Amino acid sequence: MNLHESGQMYLETILVLSKTLPSVRSIDIVEHMGYSKPSVSRAMGLLKNGGFIRIDDDGYITLTNEGREVAETIYERHTILTEALVKLGVDHETASEDACKIEHAISDRSIEAIKAYLSL
C-alpha cells in the first residue's frame, strides 16, 4: 500500500498517543487530530487493510511492525525539524506546526544532513 501524507499523520498520532495513553482508540485520534469520527474510521480501515495497524474486538488500535516503522520515521523527522527551527529562533509552537508540514516532503538525504548538522 502506498501511504500518503494523511496516513503517515495518523500513524504518527497513534504512536504519540500510545506514549501517553494505556491504549488507543479511534475516539482518542478524533480528539487529538480534530477530525470527524467518520474520517478517522475510514482512515483506520484503510490502515488496517494496508497492514499498518491492528484493531482488536474492543476497538483498541496498535501499530504493526511496518506501521511502527513508518510512525517512528515521521516522528523522528518532526522532532529533528522542530529542533532545527527552534535553534534558528522560531518559537516552539510555530516550529512544530511547520515541521509537521515539511516532514512528509523532505528527502532522507536532507533530513540526515540536518540531523548531522545538529549532531543528533
Image (spheres, rainbow, N blue to C red):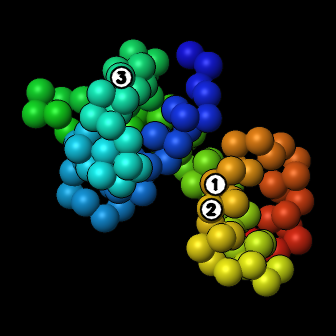
Q: Quadrant of the N terminus?
A: top right
Find residue 28 and report its horizontal and vertical position in percent. Answer: 26, 49
The amino acid pointed to by label 1 is: Cys
The amino acid pointed to by label 3 is: Arg
Which residue is label 1 attached to? Answer: 100
Find residue 103 and report its horizontal and vertical position in percent. Answer: 70, 50
**Residue sitting at 77 percent across and 41 percent down?**
105
Q: Tags 3 and 2 in contact by the CB under 8 Å rule?
A: no
* Furthest-left residue in this view: 58
**Residue sitting at 70 percent across and 43 percent down?**
104
Vertical order, 83 against 35 (above or below): below
Q: Earlier in the sequence, mark 1 or mark 3?
A: 3
Q: Quadrant of the C terminus?
A: bottom right
The answer to whether any part of residue 44 appears in the image is no
**Residue sitting at 47 percent across and 41 percent down?**
11
Q: Earlier in the sequence, mark 3 or mark 2?
A: 3
The amino acid pointed to by label 2 is: Glu
**Neighbourhood count class around disc 3 (C-alpha, 10 Å): few under 14, some 14–19, many 20 upward:** few
The answer to whether any part of residue 75 appears in the image is yes
